[in-house]
Image (cartoon, helix red, strand yellow):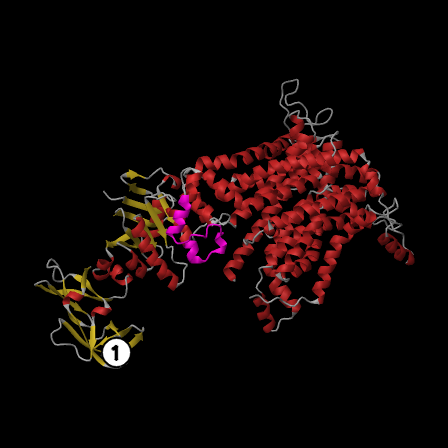
């Protein structure tokens, strides 16, 4: 049985449906992420798990028990807020001890538990400081220590790293992964940053406008997006749309306007004539002066733009038939890679297995 | 937050203050309204609710009296005129004060504001008494004025116990109420607007009249309401500083309740005063809301 | 960055005249309290006689004691009720409460005085210290509520959610998190209520009845009957007390002066 079951949950605000009949299950011990753009309902869903909001329809079950009727203080679930929400009039120790105090922990035990919690987030010695004396990263860690000190069943994190600068964010991401592994508590993480979601999670639920578009492991979401929205939202993606013109031996041919026939490895059940799109990641396209003869898909084009990123270069190539494709080339240090200039004629190629067919 | 559990908590917290104010504010007000429909008692106060013949005591005699004896309407009009004059004078004096404070640096602003508020926090009677001294017949001001008048062969005047004394004290007592909302509004003005206007050739007066003043209108209305309404009901100032002709509606109400003891009639006067005050408050709020909306959509 | 406009001499002069207008009369009262002359007309010489007379004035002392008692009681009760009202107005958007709480402040004072007079007499409730205190509480609640509500709206909402999340019941949240954070506002409100009660004249005038005297009522009768610089002396002392209370209140809660700002 899953740790947390969200059954057919709906939440409306007037005319606006924030969460629309969402069903999903979260397993114990996993790092689960709700990912999506603003307004997709991920934060609303999180707040309903925490108890700050009530669903209009459906149930939320923790360990098989319906959470309805239980206020936030009665749920074994802790939240780490985006703004940290540290109590400004209490010291770090006071903040971390607060849940223990509410749980009527014996005063003799509190000191030890607080010290252990601070050690877990590597803030030993900061006990007597006040929140306004701490940096962003330190405040973040105090918030986590406070959330974990009573060993809750589940930890909810609402975009906790959004306010940190890029370098600190990366450090904290690694810390979070390690912490989750050590402590073993289930994390439910909310973010709009897809690179963060891909890096941290065991499984991701991609949400858009109140629906779950896809629920899967990061690699599968990346390589096999189930809908156009997911393909577009996660990383960059070339979406090649058109009707299916042939389906044989596990290879589907799609007639892409402005490009031509594109082959993709797909299920044999896809009917000829059906509409669809091929999601093709830029790094899967090989770009060279001339495309190899044996490639499943080969097209010629001219470089219209490129962006040098240091480790990779992104090329925008206008194919002879008219469509622009985005291709990614690693700039390896071996010196063997040739850089292409705007106006160069190049050949693009990729195998049929590189793309992913999305129906509809 | 949670929608359930709001019920009990809400009543626990808002209950006691609501109960207290219902008991000591709303119900007395209601009783006063009811009293306006009764007859005065033999020794003052109210006549018995049910008289010997078993008839309940309900009538509109007092209302009829108010509308048929012109002197009371005249006094209302006089109070109204005083209140309007007070408001305008307060506006004229408060505007430079509020402007100065709004344009000062943060450090000075608190001090300057405090200096405006402090006199307000002193006892109301002290402020009235102070003017008794300043305008007193032996004080420097009166002697100077009468000396001047004597030089032109005119009769000496008494500054005290006159309409002049009442008016100047009304202004004095209500001035902080005009300064604060005006300041709160002026503080938000964007200096860039004035700079742009100056760039386009407007002189100081034009900048004030066409930009600053219109933008400050919500503050002006708020201040006007805070001055006009209390000024309408004032009685202590005419009582202490006014002459026999300077009775305002507040004085008449006090007289009806404490001296003549005609409570029904006093209640009628109070109700008319309340209606006038609330009407004005409503008007000020409506005008204020309109100009805020216009500001929001236009700017 | 805002540039501050040049404050012309004209502005300084007009504002300066305004400040002078505000303070000159009060300064005269204070100065003449030390004047060795019965008439508040011109300076004769320095004396502390009037203060001595004050110290021996039994009526004045009773009046002062009454005022202090009423103010203490009124301040205490109206702070408790006003804080509850402020919290309720902020948290639950009810319509009735703001109406009840704010109307006493909006209407002319005489109306409340008069209606409470009728109320007490009809109930055969004798007019005295208690009736005055009850009346003061009624109009002080509004002031405290406004200050507390303003303080609450400057507070971070997520803190109460975080407290609930940590296992605190609504009451515990209020006691350990909200109350400490709004305490400066509560104290400032209490000080304001105290000052308002000590200084109140109109409402006290109608609800005190014949036998009870408070400081403002005593000053009033002195003004009407026989004006001596004793009035100046007691006025000066009262002003001093008020000054101290207000300065303390603004130190405790600096945003007291500015109703709209959500700093600190």
- Residue A118 is covered by the magenta coloring: yes
C135 displayed left or right of A89: right
Residue B64 appears in the picture as rendered:
no
Nearer the observer, A293 or B190: A293
A234 displayed left or right of B249: left
* Quadrant of the drawing holding the N terminus of chain A: top left
- Residue C36 is covered by the magenta coloring: no
B33 displayed left or right of A281: right
Quarter of image, res C113: top right
Q: Is residue C213 above or below residue A82?
A: above
Q: Residue B257 in the image: x percent, y percent?
A: 72, 32
B209 displayed left or right of B19: right
Q: Is residue B214 above or below residue A101?
A: below
Q: Residue A261 in the image: x percent, y percent?
A: 15, 70
In the picture of the structure, the residue carrying the numbered disc 1 is: A303
Q: Which residue is painted at 71% across and 60% down in the image?
A: C15
């Amino acid at each position: 049985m899953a740790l947390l079951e969200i059954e057919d949950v709906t939440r409306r605000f007037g005319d606006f449906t924030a969460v629309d009949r969402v069903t999903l299950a979260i397993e114990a011990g996993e790092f689960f992420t709700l990912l999506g753009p603003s307004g997709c309902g991920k934060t609303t869903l999180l707040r309903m798990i925490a108890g700050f909001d009530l669903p209009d329809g459906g149930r939320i079950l923790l360990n098989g028990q319906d959470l309805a009727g239980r206020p936030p203080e009665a749920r074994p679930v802790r939240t780490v807020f985006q703004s940290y929400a540290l109590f400004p009039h209490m010291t770090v120790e006071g903040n971390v001890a607060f849940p223990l105090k509410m749980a009527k922990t014996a005063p003799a035990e509190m000191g030890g538990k607080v010290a252990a919690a601070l050690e877990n987030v590597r803030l030993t010695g900061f006990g007597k400081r006040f929140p306004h004396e701490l940096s962003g990263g330190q405040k973040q860690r105090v918030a986590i220590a406070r959330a974990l000190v009573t060993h809750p069943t589940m930890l909810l994190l609402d975009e906790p790293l959004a306010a940190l600068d890029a370098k600190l964010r990366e450090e904290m991401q690694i810390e979070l992964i390690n912490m989750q592994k050590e402590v073993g508590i289930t994390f439910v993480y909310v973010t709009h940053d897809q690179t963060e979601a891909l890096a941290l999670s065991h499984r991701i639920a991609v949400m858009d406008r109140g629906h779950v578009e896809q629920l899967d492991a990061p690699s599968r979401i990346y390589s096999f997006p189930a809908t156009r929205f997911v393909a577009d939202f996660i990383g960059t993606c070339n979406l090649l749309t058109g009707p299916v013109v042939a389906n044989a031996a596990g290879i589907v041919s799609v007639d892409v306007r402005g490009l031509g026939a594109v082959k993709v490895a797909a299920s044999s059940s896809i009917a000829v004539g059906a509409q669809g799109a091929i999601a093709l990641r830029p790094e899967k396209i090989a770009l060279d002066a001339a495309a190899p003869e044996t490639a499943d898909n080969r097209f010629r084009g001219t470089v219209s733009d490129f962006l040098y990123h240091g480790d990779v270069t992104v090329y925008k190539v206008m194919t002879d038939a008219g469509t622009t494709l985005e291709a990614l080339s690693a700039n390896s240090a071996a010196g063997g890679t040739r850089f292409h200039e705007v106006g160069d004629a190049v050949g693009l190629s990729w195998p049929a297995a590189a793309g992913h067919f999305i129906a509809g | 937050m949670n929608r359930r559990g709001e019920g009990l908590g809400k009543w626990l917290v808002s209950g006691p203050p609501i109960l207290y104010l219902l008991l000591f504010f709303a119900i007395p007000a209601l009783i006063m309204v009811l009293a306006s429909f009764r007859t005065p008692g033999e020794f003052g106060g109210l006549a018995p609710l049910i008289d010997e013949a078993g008839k309940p005591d309900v009538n509109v005699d007092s209302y009829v009296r108010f509308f048929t004896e012109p002197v009371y309407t005249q006094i209302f009009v006089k109070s109204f005129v005083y209140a309007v004059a007070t408001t305008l004078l307060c506006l004229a004096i408060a505007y430079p004060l509020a402007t100065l404070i709004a344009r000062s640096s943060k450090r000075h602003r608190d001090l300057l504001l405090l200096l405006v508020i402090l006199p307000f926090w002193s006892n109301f009677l002290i402020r009235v008494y102070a003017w008794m001294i300043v305008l007193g017949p032996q004080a420097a001001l009166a002697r100077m004025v009468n000396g001047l008048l004597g030089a032109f062969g005119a009769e000496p005047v008494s500054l005290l116990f006159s309409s002049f004394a009442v008016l100047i004290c009304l202004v004095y007592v209500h001035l902080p109420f005009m300064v604060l909302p005006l300041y709160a509004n002026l503080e938000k003005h964007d200096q860039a607007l004035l700079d742009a206007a100056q760039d386009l050739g407007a002189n100081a007066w034009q900048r004030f009249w066409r930009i600053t003043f219109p933008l400050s209108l919500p503050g002006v209305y708020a201040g006007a309401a805070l001055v006009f309404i209390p000024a309408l009901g004032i009685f202590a100032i005419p009582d202490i500083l006014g002459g026999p002709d300077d009775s305002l509606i507040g004085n008449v109400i006090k007289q009806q309740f404490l001296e003549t003891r005609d409570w029904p009639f006093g209640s009628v006067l109070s109700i008319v005063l309340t209606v006038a005050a609330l009407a004005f408050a409503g008007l000020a709020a409506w005008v204020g809301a309109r100009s805020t909306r216009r500001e929001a959509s236009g700017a | 960055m805002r540039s501050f406009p040049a404050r012309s001499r004209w502005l300084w002069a007009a504002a300066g005249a305004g400040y002078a207008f505000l303070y000159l009369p009060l300064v005269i009262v204070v100065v003449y309290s030390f004047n060795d002359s019965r008439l508040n007309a011109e300076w004769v010489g320095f004396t502390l006689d009037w203060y001595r007379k004050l110290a021996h004035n039994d009526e004045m002392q009773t009046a002062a004691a009454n005022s202090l008692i009423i103010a203490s009681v009124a301040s205490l009760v109206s702070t408790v009720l006003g804080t509850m009202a402020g919290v309720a107005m902020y948290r639950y958007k009810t319509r009735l409460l703001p109406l009840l709480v704010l109307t006493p402040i909006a209407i002319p004072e005489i109306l409340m005085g008069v209606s409470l007079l009728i109320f007490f007499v009809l109930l055969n409730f004798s007019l005295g210290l208690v009736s005055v205190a009850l009346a003061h509480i009624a109009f002080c609640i509004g002031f405290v509520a406004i200050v507390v509500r303003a303080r609450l709206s400057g507070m971070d909402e997520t803190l109460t959610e975080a407290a609930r999340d940590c296992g605190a019941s609504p009451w515990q949240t209020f006691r350990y998190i909200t109350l400490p954070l709004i305490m400066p506002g509560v104290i400032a409100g209490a000080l304001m209520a105290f000052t308002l009660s000590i200084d109140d004249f109109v409402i006290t005038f109608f609800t005190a009845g014949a036998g009870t005297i408070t400081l403002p009522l005593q000053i009033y009768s002195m003004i009407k009957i026989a004006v001596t610089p004793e009035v100046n002396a007691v006025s000066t002392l009262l002003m001093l007390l008020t000054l101290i209370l207000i300065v303390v209140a603004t130190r405790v809660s600096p945003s007291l002066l500015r109703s709209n700002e959500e700093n600190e």
